[in-house]
Amino acid sequence: MCCQPDIFRFMRTAGGTLVPELNATGQMSETSDKVSQPQAGTAAADMDPVEFTLRKRLPRKLPRRRNDVYVNMKTDFRAQLARCQKLLDAAGSGHREIYIHGLGLAISRAINIALQLQACSQGALQLAANTSTVELVDDLEPDDPDEGEVLTRTRNNSAIHIKVFYPDPQ
């Protein structure tokens, strides 16, 4: 399944560095069309007129196991909650533990799902959370293929990994 890339405006400085174009309020300019450069005579006249499209690559995923759930903001919350509950409640083959993974904006949703599962079990489930930083890679593609090569940019994003489990009976 492919999704539309987030597209922002970037400029190349005379030294070759890519910098985000800022609007009058100092925030990154966003467009639904394509990335473009300022016109000559503006404050950034020393920029090369190269247009780029920012394409965010999918993050590297952990090894996929049957009891892993990757939470995102596009899927309905109730559907993700039901999937987790189904994994824990499956008759006979139910897992004693599941792992809920959330990245970036989906961290709060992952936490909410884990807390909902714990509340629905009347405290029978326990939670163990770990946080990490994930390195993501973005591609900056020139709109005109003759303008240059595809550039890559790395950035960091926060992630959470929550183990939801039934404690061992003693």
Image (tube, grey):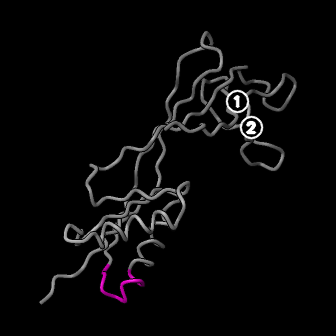
Label placed on residue 31: 2
Q: Which residue corresponds to the image point at 38% horizontal and 81% vertical from the top-left?
A: 118
Label placed on residue 133: none
Whether label 1 touches label 2, CB < 8 Å: yes
Q: Which residue corresponds to the image point at 74% horizontal and 37% vertical from the top-left?
A: 31
Label placed on residue 35: 1
Local packing at callout 2 (Cα closer than 10 Å; few below 14, some 14-19, many 20+) is few
Q: Between 110 and 121, which is closer to the camera in this rendering?
A: 121
Q: Between 29 and 80, which is closer to the camera in this rendering?
A: 80
Q: Amino acid at mark 1?
A: Val
Residue 110, x across and y down, in percent: 45, 66
Q: Which residue corresponds to the image point at 71% horizontal and 44% vertical from the top-left?
A: 28
Is 134 situated above or below 129? above
The answer to whether 82 appears left or right of 53 in the picture is left
Residue 104, x across and y down, in percent: 50, 57
Instruction: Write down the region rendered in magenta.
Output: 118-126
Q: Residue furthest top?
A: 146
The answer to whether 116 appears left or right of 15 in the picture is left
In the image, is residue 61 part of the stretch drawn in magenta?
A: no
Q: Amino acid at mark 2?
A: Thr
Local packing at callout 1 (Cα closer than 10 Å; few below 14, some 14-19, many 20+) is many
Q: Residue furthest left?
A: 170
The answer to whether 125 appears left or right of 42 in the picture is left
Q: Between 13 and 158, which is closer to the camera in this rendering?
A: 158
Q: Which residue corresponds to the image point at 60% horizontal and 24% vertical from the top-left?
A: 16
